[in-house]
Image (tube, coloured by chain):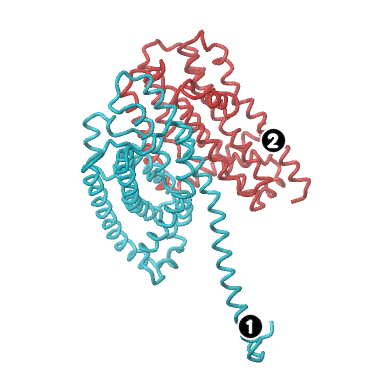
Amino acid sequence: MQSDLALPAGPRRTAELRAILSRYYGIALASFKEKLVYRFEFVAALMSSVLTAALQYYLWTAVAASAVDLPIARESLITYVVLGQVFSFTRVGAVQRRILYRVSGGIQSGGIATDLTRPVDYQVLQFCEALGLFLAELLLTSTPAYAVVLLLFEVKPPASVEAVLGFAASLCCGFLLAFAFNFLLMMASFWTYSVRGVMRGQKAVLDLFGGALVPLALFPDWLRGIALALPFQGLAYTPLSIYIGAIHGTAIWSALTVQVIWSIALILLTRLIWLRGARRIIIQGG
Amino acid sequence: MRYYLDLYATYIGLFWKIMLQYRADLAVFFVTMLIADTMSLAFLTLVFGVIQQLQGWSFYEVVLMYGLIRASTALSVLLLNAPWSIPGYIRSGTLDILLVRPPSPLFQLVGTEGIEPSNISSLLIAFAAIALGLTQIGASVQAWWLIYIPLAICSGAVLQFSLLLIVACLAFRFVSIQSAMYPVGWFADFARFPTTIYSKPLQVLLTWVLPYATVSFYPVAFMLRGTDYQLSGLLAPLAGPLMLGLALLIWRRSLSRYQSTGS
C-alpha cells in the first residue's frame, strides 16, 4: 500500500482518521466478540444454577417432610438452600475458570511475564476484572436464576426491608471474600496443572463450611462452632441468613463487620503472598 | 480381537510412562478429589443429622446409592473419558489423522485420550462408601449382590460414556459443544438420592432419558426391597449397553457423513 504521507494534506487527514477509526473498531469488535463467547458461559452458569437449585429444592422438601422437628421453619429452609445455588460465591465463575485454565502452568510457558510488565498493579487489575465479572454474572446469571426459583422452587422474598438492604450489603462483602479466595486459587494455578482438582476441592470445602449446602443452624454444635470461626461463612451463611431473617436487627451489623474483617485480612494475606511470589516469578525469568 | 487387546495394552503402557512424569499433579488430584468426595459424604451425614429416614430410605441405603453412582462416574472418567476430547479433535482437524490409521478412530480415542487418572481417589472412596453401606444396612449381604453391584457399576460407567459420546457427536455440526457436555454430568448428581424425591417429569428424565437412576436407585431398591422393584432391578443394568448401542450408531452415522463431505 502506498504511503499515506505521500498524499497532500486533506486526503492525508482522512486517511489518518480512517486508520484510527478502523483500529478502534477492531478493538471494539474484538472485545464484543469476547463478550459473545462469554455469553455462552453465562447461559451455562444459569443452567447449572437452576439444576443444582432444583436438586436442593427436592432434597430438602423431602427432608422437611421426613423430619420430626426442624431448627428452621420449612419455608425459610427451602428458600435458604435454593438461594444458596443462585447466589453462590463458592462457585468459581465460568469466565474465571477459563482464565485459570489459561494461566495454569503459566509459569512454564512464561505467559505471565507480559502481564507482569504492565504498568498497572497485577492484583488491582485482577480485582477490576473480577468486579466486572461479578456484576455481569449478577445481571446475566443470578437475576434470571432468581426469577426462576421464585416461580418454581417455593423461594420466598426477603424477610423485610432491612433484610433486603442487609442482603445486598452482605453480597458485596461476600464478593470481597470470594475475590481473596479466587486470587489464592489463581496463584495456585501458576504452579500446578492440576488446578481443576484444586478448584473442585476448594469448592467442596467452601460449600460445606460456608453453609451454602446446609444451613449452619442444622450443624451439630461442635461443627457449627468451627464453621463460625472460619471465614467461609461470609460466602453463603451470612448473606442467606440475613435474607431469610435469621440474622436481623443489630446482629446484621456484627455479621457484616465479621465479613469485612475477614475480607480485609484475606486480601492482605494474598497481597503478601503475591508480592513474595511475583518476585520469584521475575527472578525465574518469566 | 487379539489385535485390539494388544493395542489397548500398548496404550496403557504409553499412558503409564507419561503419568510417571506428572507424579506431582497426580498427587494433587488424589488429595483434592479425596477432600471433595469426603465433603460429599459429610453433606450426606449432615442431612441425616436432621432426619432418620429420607422418604423411607435410611442413611446407609443412601450412602450405598452414592457409592454406586460415584463409582460409575469415577470409573467412566478413569477409562472412558474420551468423549471430552472429540470436539477438540474435530475442530483441529486431527480426527482425519485417526481416520487414516487402521484401528477404529473411536478405539484410538478411547486408548489415547480416554484414560484420566484424576478420579482414582474418588473411585476408592466410592468403594469404601459401598462397603460401608453394605455392612451397616442391617440386612445380610446376599451372594448375588457381589456380582450385581460390579455389573451395575460397569453398566453405569458405560452409560456415562455413551451419553457423553452422543452429545459429543454434535461437535460435528456445532463447533463449541463442549459446554453442553457438562449438563450431562450434572444429572448424575441427582442419582445420589432416591429418585422418588423428585417430581414426576424429573423421575422420567432420570429413568428413561438420562437414566442415571438405573445405576444407583433401582439397583439398591432391587437389592433391599426386592419384590417391589424386581423388574426395574433386573432391567437396570441394561441401560448402559443399550445407550452404548445408540451412541455407537450415532457416532458411525456422524463419522460417515463427516468423511463423505471431504472435510
Query: Which chain has been coloured cyan in this picture?
Result: A
What residue type is disc 2 on? Ile
Q: Residue furthest top?
A: B227
Residue A259 location (% of width, % of height): 26, 48
Residue A88 location (% of width, % of height): 39, 43
Residue A7 location (% of width, % of height): 67, 89
Query: Which chain letter goes with mark 1?
Result: A
Query: Which chain letter goes with mark 2?
Result: B
Name the residue nearer the viewer: B200 or B141: B200
Residue A51 location (% of width, % of height): 49, 35
Note whether A162 is above or below B189 in the view shown.
below
Q: Residue at x 31, y 42 (%)?
A: A163
Asked if marks 2 and 1 fall on the same chain, the answer is no
- Image colour assigned to chain B: red
What residue type is disc 1 on? Thr
Q: Residues within 10 Å of mark 2 (few under 14, many from 20)?
A: some
Q: Using the image, tell me which numbered label, if any, was put on residue B60.
A: none
Q: Residue at x 42, y 39 (%)?
A: A85
Name the residue nearer the viewer: A41 or A188: A41
- Badge 2 is on which residue? B250
The image quadrant that residue A5 belongs to is bottom right
- Badge 1 is on which residue? A14
Q: Residue at x 56, y 19 (%)?
A: B236
Q: Residues within 10 Å of mark 1 (few under 14, many from 20)?
A: few
